[in-house]
Image: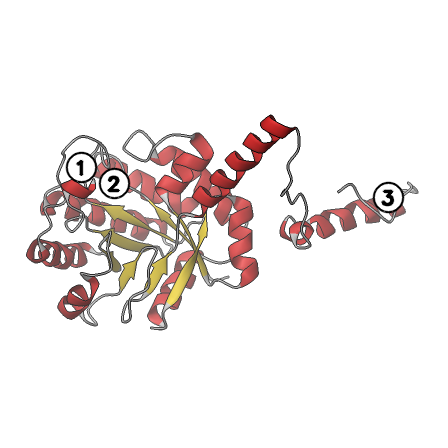
């Protein structure tokens, strides 16, 4: 059987642009696979907000992210990429958490170079190039020691400046320098958030040396896009429905069923098992099931 990491690597090495479907739960992962996405992506902000109701600013842990990523990866057969934030505080953390991701069936992750607490009011800056190289190297060592393939995407936040809420300084020269250093440390792909406009210059700098990924937008010449943000629509819709229910006692636009629901949760499979058991043991069965 081909491993998840190998599936993702082969997908990237085909050289055909693809989009990783947006997932933040097991059922949304199933939906990504059901509609035909070749891979799925779990964002840190999406997972921290949807499952734990906390921000993705350093308070959300890798233990929590791995817990939810595992549930998604084991509900789908397409490869899953996870947002691994900074992989903890030390190289030991980076090794340990990488091993945990691999053990849980995740195909790859991106690891960023912003210091904790990240994406917060604190003006933090980025890890030194040497420190981030050490994290990537520790992750690669964990992959080798596991005996399984695993895709490591190095996220560089240099173009995500402090005034926009990031930790970078906004220097293209520094971003390119960091990208080359992360390649040397063992990264399989590079990712430079948050905007599309610098991507053409980055493509010129890296060319065919290493694949470039984007998040939430497509740019010609890049390898793949990691889609995210769907949880916001889901949460906003739930807020709207609950307000209406509280105010009026009913929900006018609710959809409590849809044709694909049962297939997405393997209801026919489990119904079949129960019906077969009932027939074999002389128990009664019925043609319908609870909605």
Residue 5, image x and y in percent? 39, 57
Q: Where is residue 218 in the image (x, y as percent from the top left)?
A: 32, 64
Categorize mark 3 by other alpha carbons within 10 Å: few (<14), some (14-19), many (20+): some
Secondary structure of the residue carrying tag 2 is loop
What sort of colour scheme is used for the picture?
secondary structure
Residue designated by label 3: 278
> The residue tagged with tag 3: helix, strand or loop?
helix
Question: Is there a contact, CB below 8 Å, between mark 2 and mark 3?
Answer: no
In-front residue for pair 241/30: 241
The tag earlier along the polypeptide, 1 or 2, is: 2
Mark 1 and mark 2 in contact? Answer it, CB < 8 Å.
Answer: yes
- Which-is-in-front pick, marks 1 and 3? 1
What is the spatial separation of the Cα atoms under label 1 and label 2, in whole angstroms? Answer: 8 Å
For label 1, the residue is 115
Examine the image and state in which quarter residue 99 appears. top left
Q: Where is residue 15 in the image (x, y as percent from the top left)?
A: 33, 73
Badge nearest the viewer, 2 or 3: 2
Percent of width and height locating residue 193: 24, 52
Residue 167: tell me if it is visible.
no
Q: Position of 32 compared to 141: left or right?
A: right
Among numbered discs 1 and 3, the one appearing first in the sequence: 1
Left or right of 176 on screen, residue 60? right
Residue at image x 89%, y 42%? 281
Position of 168 with respect to 100 (left or right) is left
Residue designated by label 2? 86
Whole-angstrom CA distance, mark 1 to mark 3, is: 58 Å
Residue 110 visible in the displayed image: yes
Q: How far apart are marks 2 and 3 (CA)?
A: 51 Å
**261, above or below 225, in the image:** above
């Amino acid at each position: 059987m081909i491993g998840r990491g190998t599936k993702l690597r082969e997908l990237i090495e085909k050289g055909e642009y693809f989009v990783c479907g947006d997932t933040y739960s097991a059922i949304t992962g199933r939906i990504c696979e059901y509609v035909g996405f070749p891979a799925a992506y779990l964002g840190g902000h999406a997972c921290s907000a949807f499952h734990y109701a906390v921000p993705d600013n350093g308070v959300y842990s890798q233990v929590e992210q791995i817990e939810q990523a595992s549930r998604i990866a084991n509900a789908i057969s397409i490869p899953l990429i996870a947002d691994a934030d900074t992989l903890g505080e030390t190289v030991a953390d980076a090794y340990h958490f990488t091993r945990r991701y691999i053990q849980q069936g995740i195909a790859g992750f991106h690891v960023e170079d912003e210091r904790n607490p990240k994406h917060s009011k604190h003006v933090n800056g980025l890890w030194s190039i040497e420190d981030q190289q050490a994290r990537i190297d520790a992750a690669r060592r964990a992959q080798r020691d596991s005996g399984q393939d695993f895709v490591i995407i190095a996220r560089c936040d240099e173009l995500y400046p402090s005034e926009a809420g990031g930790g970078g300084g906004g220097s293209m020269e520094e971003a390119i320098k960091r990208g080359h250093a992360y390649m040397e440390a063992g990264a399989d792909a590079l990712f430079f958030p948050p905007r599309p406009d610098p991507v053409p210059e980055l493509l010129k700098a890296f060319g065919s040396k290493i694949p470039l990924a984007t998040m939430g937008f497509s740019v010609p010449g890049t390898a793949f896009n990691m889609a995210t943000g769907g949880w916001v629509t889901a949460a906003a819709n739930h807020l709207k429905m609950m307000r209406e229910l509280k105010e009026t006692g009913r929900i006018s636009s609710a959809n409590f069923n849809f044709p694909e629901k049962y297939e997405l949760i393997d209801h026919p499979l489990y119904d079949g098992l129960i019906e077969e058991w009932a027939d074999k043991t002389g128990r009664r069965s019925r043609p319908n099931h609870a909605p």
